[in-house]
Image: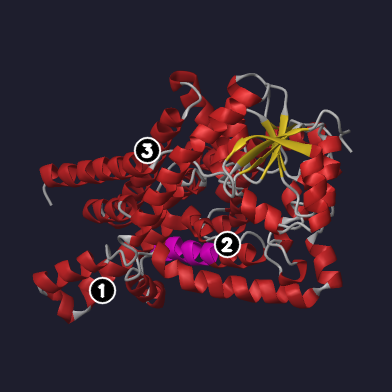
Amino acid sequence: MNIALKIAILLFVLIFSAGYLAYLFDGYPGLSDGNDYAGLGRSIIRGEGFCLGHLYPLAFVFNSNIPQPDNIWAPSYPVYLSLWFIVLGDNDTAILMATIFMVWLMIAAAYYCGKTLLGDNWGILAATLVGLNQSVLKVALEGSPEILAGALLAFSYILVTGKGGKYRVILSAVIFAIAVLARYQIAVLAIPFVIFLPRRDLKRAALWVAVMIVSLMPWLVRNYLVLGSPFFTLQTYGEFTKGMGHLKHYYLVYRSFEPVTLGYALGNFPFYVFKKFAAGIVFFALNIPAVLNFFGIIPLAYAVRKIFILPDIRMRFIGFTMISSAIIVLLSSFDGQHWRHIVNLQVLLTVSIVAGVMMMLENMAIWKRKFMAALLVAAMFFPARFPFQEKELSNTAATVRDDKLKYETIAKETGPGDVVISDASDAVWWYADRLSVWIPVRYGDVVKVMDMAKAHYVYLANMSEYFSGLSDEDLADFHTRMIQVDGVAGGWGLFRRNQNQGLI
């Protein structure tokens, strides 16, 4: 492949991915994690520290203040966003530009990784597969840090290939630590990383581990000083029980004052823990093919089957990829159960797929013919979800555009220090710039939050859905306690505390 064609392909991929993101991004829905990451980035540039202005009710069990020092989200992605906010302001335009650049970083990681392991042409194929992958683009649009984490993870691993000196090992360890601070789950991959280091060298491995730990220490020390524990996170009290059938509501623990650890769940309702874990395995089995562009699973399986005849560096790379994938699936089956966790490994998986394609072309007679070879490569781009995903994303963007007008109303009707309880609390914090609390499941807990957070406002993005879950007595109490300020009957509603009623 000549240089002009390579450049043309890469430019097309960069332009297409940027256009895709720009066309389909118009902000974040009410409970998107992207709101929280953006809000944290804004807090950083305002000099307010790494603090959340949107809280789960569960957070009040450990700290009664709002805002609170963050104990859920990892810091790398908000810090990355804050750099864009400094230049472009804390707005959706800055987020879009940051998102495009982040996807381009993952494309570059795929090219560099594929080129190093397989050759320049194969690096182009890996970069193209990543840049056009629907899962990558959707996760980027959701404002989740897997794209940043995945790119950093790939760069970190590939830096220690070949003959590089200790400085490459040091840089690799630092980048891995930053990836961990973008997505905490990646920390567990340090074990297979060391086991599958491209060069078997105990000194290099020890240096890598030491630098990685030292790089993480500032954040761990911060957590110890601010939160009382280097590893404290609210997720350990609610994430493992999320979606568990025993608890009736998907987010019951987060939206309550009842922390539940994995140990407690195992000791008190082990059947439901096992049921959730089994359901998680099935969930990932059904969703991984989509992350791999469906047909990509065929050359990936071929590469794994032939792994022991590969050159050592490729064998260890694919071994690291597969073991890491298994670990992430097992871990995520216990906690979040979201397919985007696999996108952390997108570059590694894509390069492994490309390695499988290369082996199939080399070792199977049918692929020796150029037409059949082109057909095999083209099949790797098969997007079975098209255009359903684009329709879904377009509808989401339209909904967000409408909702932004409601957040403007909230900002006008409330003051900077007011606290809003809401079923769209993430977006209330980011778009209305108001302190917010995710509305509890139980109405009695709503009343408690009003008292604890001195919350004077309630915003319901879906009023009819929320009211339908209340008893007649609770509904009457709500309307006695609150006065509607704005909204649409059966749709959304903004309520203010009745001054003639106490907080409790």
Report the mark closest to the observer, 3 or 2.
3
Q: Is residue 203 above or below residue 196?
A: above
> Which residue does the numbered mark 2 point to in the structure image?
328
Q: Give the image location of residue 27, x and y in percent.
A: 46, 38
The one nearer the camera, 378 or 269, is 269
Q: Earlier in the sequence, mark 3 or mark 1?
A: 3
Magenta-colored span: 314-325
Distance from label 3 to label 2 (Cα)?
26 Å
Residue nearer the viewer, 431 or 238: 431
Tell me the amino acid under the disc marked 1.
Answer: Met
Q: Quadrant of the C terminus?
A: top right
State whether residue 160 appears in this view. Answer: no
Can you identify the residue that label 1 sits on? 360
Query: Label 2 is placed on what type of residue?
Result: Ile
Quadrant of res 438 = top right
Q: Residues within 10 Å of mark 2 (few under 14, many from 20)?
A: some
**Residue at coordinates 59% horizontally, 43% vertically from top-left?**
492
Name the residue rendered at 72%, 51% in the picture: 235
First reached walking from the N terminus: tag 1 or tag 2 = 2
Q: Position of residue 399 (x, y in %)?
A: 45, 45
Residue, x 32% and y 67% (percent of image)?
Answer: 384
Looking at the image, tell me whether mark 3 or mark 2 is earlier in sequence order. Answer: 3
Q: Which residue appears at 39% of the width and 45% of the height?
A: 106
Q: How was the colour assigned to the protein in this rendering?
A: secondary structure
Q: Is residue 220 left or right of residue 175?
A: right
Q: Which mark is residue 100?
A: 3
Give the mark toward the camera: 1 or 2.
Answer: 2
Residue 343 seen: yes
The quadrant where residue 60 appears:
top right
* 311 displayed left or right of 439: left
